[in-house]
Image: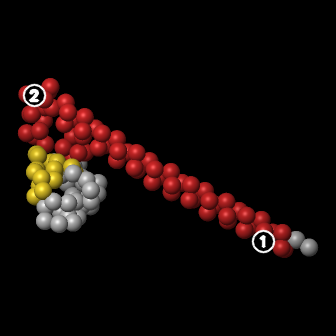
Amino acid sequence: MFTKENPEDHLDAIYMGTVNEKKVFGESAILEGGVRTANVLCCSDTTLLEIKRAPFKQFLLNYASKAQPLLRYLINQLIDKLDHTNNELTLARNTLYEIQRQEVEQAQFEVQLDTP
């Protein structure tokens, strides 16, 4: 469907089909522009609804009260993404700490073996 690092200015919403259990892609792109932060591959024939950034911003200005549920949804998607990234970083940090701990133990063991 699209790949990471591609410049984008729109949001894609799944109208019909299956894509990695997620229903909306491009929440960062529609809010701030920039490039895609992930690869997306369709699991079946998929129909997308594409929402461009400029008309979306105009919709927000003209219909602020009606846009609130959509904005809440997009914000929740971004929060979920941040939580997921935070969990991945925590796991990576803990893995590195464990590797370092094992290396220190191995070095201490080798010193003990060398000591008469």
Q: Position of residue 28 (x, y in %)?
A: 25, 45
Left or right of residue 52, residue 86 in this image: right
In this picture, residue 81 sits left or right of residue 62: right
**Is label 2 or label 1 in front?**
2
Q: Amino acid at mark 1?
A: Glu
User: Where is the C terminus found, in terms of image quarters?
Assistant: bottom right
Instruction: Work out how far the residue at label 2 is from the one at label 1, CA to CA, in angstroms.
Output: 70 Å
- Residue count near mark 2 (Cα–Cα under 10 Å), binned few <14, some 14–19, many ≥20: few
Residue 85 visible (yes or no): yes
Give the camera-side residue of 31 and 46. Answer: 46
Q: Residue 109: give x, y in percent of width and height.
A: 78, 68
Comparing 25 with 114, the one in front is 25
Q: Of marks 2 and 1, which one's residue comes earlier in the chain?
A: 2
Give percent across and percent down for residue 42: 20, 64
Residue 98 pos. (x, y %): 62, 59
Secondary element under disc 2, as helix, strand or loop, is: loop
| Residue identifier under label 1 | 110
Which residue does the numbered mark 2 point to in the structure image?
63
Residue at x 17% of width, y 66% of height: 44
Q: Is residue 2 visible?
A: no
The residue depicted at 22 percent of the width and 60 percent of the height is 19
Which residue lies at the image location 24% right of the left edge and 40% below the top edge? 74
Name the colouring of the figure. secondary structure
Q: At label 2, which amino acid type do we have?
A: Tyr
Q: Which mark is residue 13?
A: none
